[in-house]
Amino acid sequence: MSWPEFLGWLDTLALDVGGYHISLLGGLKVITVAVIVLMAGWVLTRLVRRFFRRLSRLDATQQVLGEKLVSVVIWTALVLIGIDVLGISLTALTVFSGAFGLAIGFGLQKTLGNLISGIILLMDRSIKPGDVIAVGTGADKTVGKVDRIGMRAVAVTTRDHIKYLIPNELLMTSAVENWTASTKDERMKVPVRVAYGTDLELAEQLMLQATEGVERVQPDPPPAVWLVAFAETAIEFEIQVSIRTPEIGTGAIRSAILAKVWRLFRDHGLALPAPPDR
C-alpha cells in the first residue's frame, strides 16, 4: 500500500456528524499540529528568555516584562497558524463562543486575572525579581525573596528556604511590604511587659541600655522606649530601634535585645509579669 493509499484509508475511518467529516486522519493531523505548535512555542519562548536576559541595558523588571509580552504574542501567533494549517474556519468557532465565554467567566477567571495582574506588576515595577517582600499580617505574614514573576504566580523563597507561589492577583489586592524598594533602614518594635510595682524610669533606662551594642541596630535615629498600655496583668512597653538591612531578617536582633533585657532586669531586681493562670 502506497503512502497516498494509506492516507486515503485513514480518511475512510470516519464519522460524519452533520456537515462535518471526523476521520482518524483528521485526528492525527490535529495531534501532529498541536505537538508542533507546543514544541515551537517551547523553543521560541526559551530563545526569547535568553535574548532578554542578555540585554544588560534593561533591568530585571523590564527583562521579565518584555519576555512575557513577546511570549504571549508568540503563543497567539502559533495557535492562529495551527488553526490555519488545519483549515479550521474561524467563523465556525463562533458556534462555541457561548460555551467559551462561560469557560472564561468561570473556569479561567482566576487564570486571566493572575495573568493580567502579573503584567500590571511588571509594568508598575513595584515588585521585581530580587526584591524582599512581606505579604500578610501578624502570624500569617510571609517574608521572602522574589525569585521569579510568572504568568500565574510570583515565586518567593523565605529565609527558611521554603518556596511559596503567591498568586499575582493576591499581590494586587493585599497589602505588600517591599523591603528592598524602601529605605535600607527599618524601624523595628520589640514589645516588653513588666510587672506592676516596677520602677518605670529604671525599666526604661535598662531597656534602652539593652539596645546598645546589638549588631545592625542604628544609633541614628536613636532607640526609644514607649509606654504602650496598662494591661490587666502587666505594664506594656515597646522598644523601637532602627536597623540596617532588614531584608536579611530581624529575628536575631529581637532575640539579642530581649536576652539583654532579661539579664539587666535580673541584675537590677526588676520582675517580669508572671504568666496568667490557665
Image (cartoon, grey):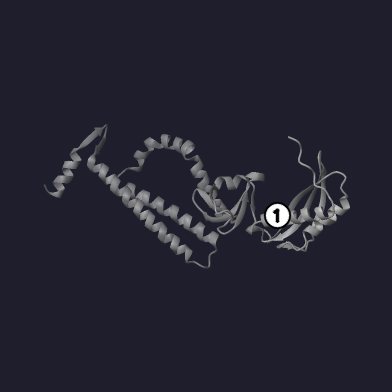
Numbered circles on residues, count: 1
Task: Name which residue lies at 74% across and 52% down.
Answer: 189
In this orientation, which residue lies closer to the viewer: 197 or 158?
Answer: 197
Q: Is residue 225 left or right of residue 97?
A: right
Q: Is residue 43 left or right of residue 66?
A: left
Quadrant into which the C terminus falls: top right
Q: Residue furthest bottom?
A: 56
In this orientation, which residue lies closer to the viewer: 176 or 76?
Answer: 176
Q: Quadrant of residue 187?
A: bottom right
Task: Name which residue lies at 51% across and 58% down.
Answer: 64
In this orientation, which residue lies closer to the viewer: 140 or 6?
Answer: 140
Point out residue 122 in the picture as x, y percentages from the top left corner: 55, 55
Reply above or below: 60 against 82.
Answer: below
Point out residue 91 in the picture as x, y percentages from the top left corner: 35, 40
Point out residue 98 in the picture as x, y percentages from the top left corner: 42, 34
Residue 55 seen: yes
Mark 1: give few (<14), some (14-19) or many (20+) Cα within 10 Å.
few
Q: Is residue 239 left or right of residue 143?
A: right
Q: Is residue 179 left or right of residue 50?
A: right
Q: Quadrant of residue 129?
A: bottom right
In the structure shown, which secondary structural element does the residue marked by tag 1 occupy?
helix
Residue 180 seen: no
Q: Residue furthest left?
A: 1
Point out residue 210 in the picture as x, y percentages from the top left corner: 78, 58
Reply above or below: 176 against 23.
Answer: below
Reply above or below: 41 against 7.
Answer: below
Q: Identify the residue under disc 1.
A: 255
Residue type beneath disc 1: Ser
In this orientation, which residue lies closer to the viewer: 174 or 18?
Answer: 174
